[in-house]
Image: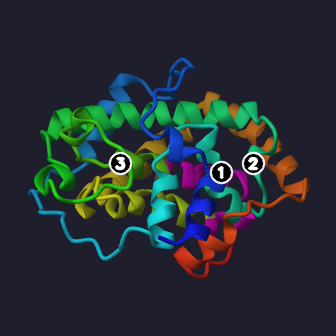
Amino acid sequence: MRPAAALAACALLTACATAGVPSPAPTPQGYLTGEQIARVATLIPDTILIDGAGNPVEPGTDRWWMAIAHAEIRPPEAAQHFDCALGTRLAARPRPALRRLMGRLLADADSLTREASRLHGPHPRPIAVHRGLEPCQRVSPEVRDSPSYPAAGAVAGTLYGETFAALAPDRAGQTRRIGREIGSSRIVCRMNSEQDVHAGERGGRELYSLIVTSAEFQADLEAARAEVAAARAEGLTNPSCAAERRALGPMPDGG
């Protein structure tokens, strides 16, 4: 275990202590109707079951600690995953519009994951098939045996990545990369297989193409854009960015 990497993960996020703990805040309503969610679920293809045990990332590495942080996809904590891509520190003060925006996106991501799982049938998680695998987070028996397809983290990560690209177009390449890495972290965590993540990314892209047509989303996006611009002007940075660079390597250029 590398202490610096562990500390960086905890600095990025309090997921080390809170992953899997229900949020006390009420669940917000998403932007899409149940009919729209059901239509998107049909666009996620059926797939054969794959073992999902292969994972080259070892526990204790920088990428492993990043995956622990990425296990938290609820706002406001999840916004911090994009700090380094944006060159700021979003948790430095409350960002209510951004929290509302991300909360509603997560509600749609959750609805799609549930509907797609119902439609395509349960797929076991890698940690359920291979009981000896070490997940990167504490999991209850219920979570271990819950459906894996599509990966909820990949759906949410894709939505967040596209949304932050709209909030900060000059960092679009970087924010989309982080959105993909949030999904990939579920593979690192042994919670989802590669096919689960690919299906989640597909679902996230399809969701976003509908969400952007919502007038409510556009209003929330505009309010959050002002908060993100203000955060970037504050001149603060997240101390975990060095660990993120080690874990991911060079980031793409913006745009």
Measured Cα–Cα span from mark 2 to mark 1? 6 Å
> Which residue sits furthest right?
234
Q: Position of residue 238 (x, y in %)?
A: 74, 60
Q: Is residue 149 left or right of residue 223?
A: left
To which quarter of the image does residue 252 belong? Answer: bottom right
Which quadrant is the C terminus positioned in? bottom right
Category of crowding for the residue at label 2, using alpha-carbon neighbours closer than 10 angstroms: few (below 14), some (14–19), many (at least 20): many
Q: Could you tell me if the residues under marks 2 and 1 are in contact, i.e. CB atoms within 8 Å? A: yes
Q: Position of residue 227 (x, y in %)?
A: 81, 42
Q: Could you tell me if the residues under marks 3 and 1 are in contact, i.e. CB atoms within 8 Å? A: no
Of the two numbered discs 2 and 3 in the rendering, the one whose residue sits closer to the viewer: 2
Q: Three-letter amino acid code at disc 2?
A: Leu
Q: Could you tell me if the residues under marks 2 and 3 are in contact, i.e. CB atoms within 8 Å? A: no
**Residue 203's mark?**
3
Category of crowding for the residue at label 1, using alpha-carbon neighbours closer than 10 angstroms: few (below 14), some (14–19), many (at least 20): many
> Which residue sits furthest left?
48
The secondary structure that dominates the magenta segment is helix
Q: Which residue is mark 2?
A: 90
Measured Cα–Cα span from mark 2 to mark 3? 27 Å
Query: Which of the two residues, 132 or 94, is positioned nearer the viewer here?
Result: 132
Q: Three-letter amino acid code at disc 3?
A: Gly
